[in-house]
Amino acid sequence: MWHDHLECKPKPILADVLASSLAKMDVNLQFWRSEGQSFLRRLYHWVNILDPSGLLSSDDEIEKARSQLGNTGDLLSKDKVMDAWKLSLSSVHPDTGSTLPVIFRPPAFLPVASPLVIGSFLPHKGVKSALFWQFLLQSFSAGFNYANRNATSLKDNKVSLKQLVLIAGSVTYATCVGTLPQFVMTRYGLTSPSVQRFFRSVLPVPLSAFLSAFNVLVVRAEEYESGIQVFDSNGNAVGVSQKAGMKAVNETAVSRAVMIGTTAAVPNLLVGFLQRTRFGQRSPLVVAPFRHITTALVLGLMIPVSFSLFPQLGTIQKDKLEKELQAATSDGQLFYHRGL
């Protein structure tokens, strides 16, 4: 499917890029502008982009793929089109043009995050193990959120002292709050089955969703303060907008909350149903592996859904921007890179 679709679509995208020497949008954003304005289209592309086989590609192969996207003469082969777009979209940051660290590329999210998510949802016997898994999960989430942020307002790609404090604060707070249910049960010796069910199955759902959104909001807080770049319909940079930055971060926080919240809720519902069946009552040892497998499956399904909830190249009406930006363009709608 990807193969057939890219046979006809990338050429006009690249033609638009090459037609104007004033274009400032990265080729990845040009792709999302043409292909990412409907949820189903975005979902279709993310399912293909998240193929983990691309993680094995070297930096030289990624650079070669990017150069092919800028040379229409190399885009006659269908296989080259497919491979070049997948590598570019999954491996290169559209604001900096630099290759993302392997562990923080979108295709690495499932293989890295799934054991961390499963570990954080385990029925821990003590606080230390709960802290350990929460720390790993929140640390990876912070790293992924930072690596895939909008970086257009930064003069360089270096991590500032303020950003380090925000990341460390986010990880520390989220780790402690995420461990709170286990701490309460251990501290006060709560052994009632109904109480334990609440702290292990009910409370983690909204708590996990909140912490996922919180991680995004704090790690990418500088986008609220400094703003992000907005583009006109021709791909020209118009200026930097705090309001666009707020919209981009809020959308990403909502998408991450939906992903983790659903991943926490669905396995609990399925396990509860299994435990009420004859098979579940006769084979209680099956419940734990069933929970782990369903958690990994739900997470795998929710990742492309979460990434597709909002456009990668978002839009904002001109009258919702700062007054100086409204006066800088005649377009009624501007574009911004949402980040991931």
Image (tube, rainbow, N blue to C red):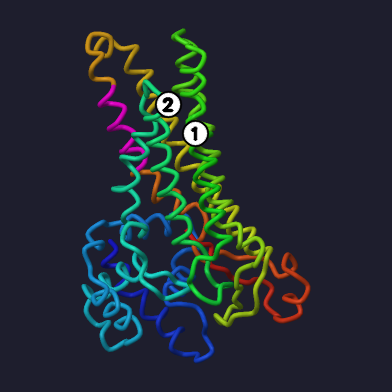
**Quadrant, the N terminus:** bottom left
Mark 1 and 2 residues: CB-CB less than 8 Å, in contact? no
- Identity, as a three-letter code, of the amino acid under mark 1: Gly
Mark 1 secondary-structure assignment: helix
Q: What residue sits 62% from the left and 63% below the top?
A: 245
Q: Position of residue 66 (x, y in %)?
A: 33, 79
Where is 249 relative to 259, above or below? below
| Residue at mark 1 | 178
Residue at 51% in and 75% down? 156
Q: Give the residue at x 55% y 41%.
A: 173
Three-letter residue code for mark 2: Val
Q: Main secondary structure of the magenta part?
A: helix
Location of residue 13 in the rendering, given as x and y in whole percent from the top left corner: 42, 78
> Which of disc 2 and disc 1 is earlier in sequence?
2
Q: Is residue 92 magenta?
A: no
Q: Which residue is mark 2?
A: 127
* Residue 82 vs residue 102, the one in the foreground: 102
Taking 232 as reference, is 261 left or right? Answer: left
The residue segment tinted magenta is 288-299
Magenta run includes residue 293: yes
